[in-house]
Image (spheres, rainbow, N blue to C red):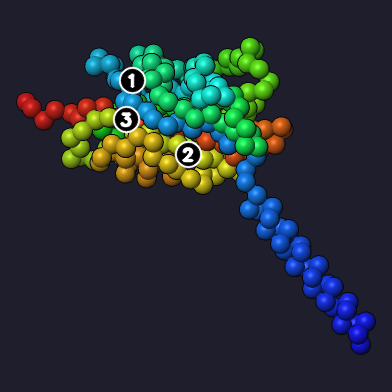
Amino acid sequence: MRCTLGVSVALFLFSVSIVSSGRGQADRPRVFHSAEVLSASDVNIPFNSVANGMVELHLTVGDTGKLEDVRVARPLVSVTEEAVRAVKTWSFAPATMQGKSIASLLTVCIVFCPAATVGLELPLPPITDNSPQDISADVFPPKLPEVIAATYPPDGSGRVVSGTVVLRVLVEADGQQSLVRVVRDVPTLTAPALVTIKDWKFSPAALDGKNAASGIVVAFAFRPPLSNSN
């Protein structure tokens, strides 16, 4: 009887230890944390530009948070230079690997919205194959998250402001969004941007040959509203 009771107690303790171990793994902090945008400014839209679409930039952020390089992955005629000029004025926090600051790559997508849109799909031309050969193997992650489906934010008929809303989206290892943080808020424009980003689809980053969670920055540059004057 004592032997049977002892075996039962041992099995119970073993099962508790397995559950606790599983919870510990699930609660374990992420090994890699991607770079963050701390502050962002407006992206200027040239007055004579009619470009609608997205500029995708791949940034190299050093281990001190300094922006070291900007590479154009998806260009857009007449606004690419403005997109690059804008991100060079932004401030960043470096990525970390096991708690240590490291140099890393960060994707920034800047969407130039039409003057008036209702649920339009955002064109996504192929990413330019300009993989840098001079970037150190110590720059993480080797494969960045990528936008694979997107739409423009709806533009309310009563809009009277323009500006750039900047969001930071955490893309999990399965490609799903898990957290969206507002980096730059523009009253009346942030809400439609947040609603729209929920429908965007992403492919995950890759680290050491495995899918990994990583952040991606999405900015929506809204044009000045159409004039009602005759």
- The mark that comes first in sequence, 2 or 3, is 3
Q: Position of residue 176 (x, y in %)?
A: 55, 44
Any part of residue 198 in sight: yes
Quadrant location, the N terminus: bottom right
Contact check, label 3 and label 1, Cβ < 8 Å: no
Q: Quadrant of residue 223?
A: top left
Q: CA distance from mark 2 to mark 1?
A: 24 Å
Taking depth in this image into account, of 119 and 161 the one nearest to the observer is: 161
Q: Which residue is mark 1?
A: 51
Q: Residue furthest left?
A: 230
Q: Tell me which amino acid carries mark 1.
A: Ala
Between disc 2 and disc 1, the foreground one is: 2
Count of marks overlaid on the render: 3
Residue occupying image coordinates x 71% and y 62%? 20
Disc ID at residue 169 = 2
Residue occupying image coordinates x 88% and y 79%? 6
Q: CA distance from mark 2 to mark 3?
A: 16 Å
Residue occupying image coordinates x 46% and y 27%? 92
- The mark that comes first in sequence, 3 or 1, is 1
Q: Tell me which amino acid carries mark 2.
A: Val
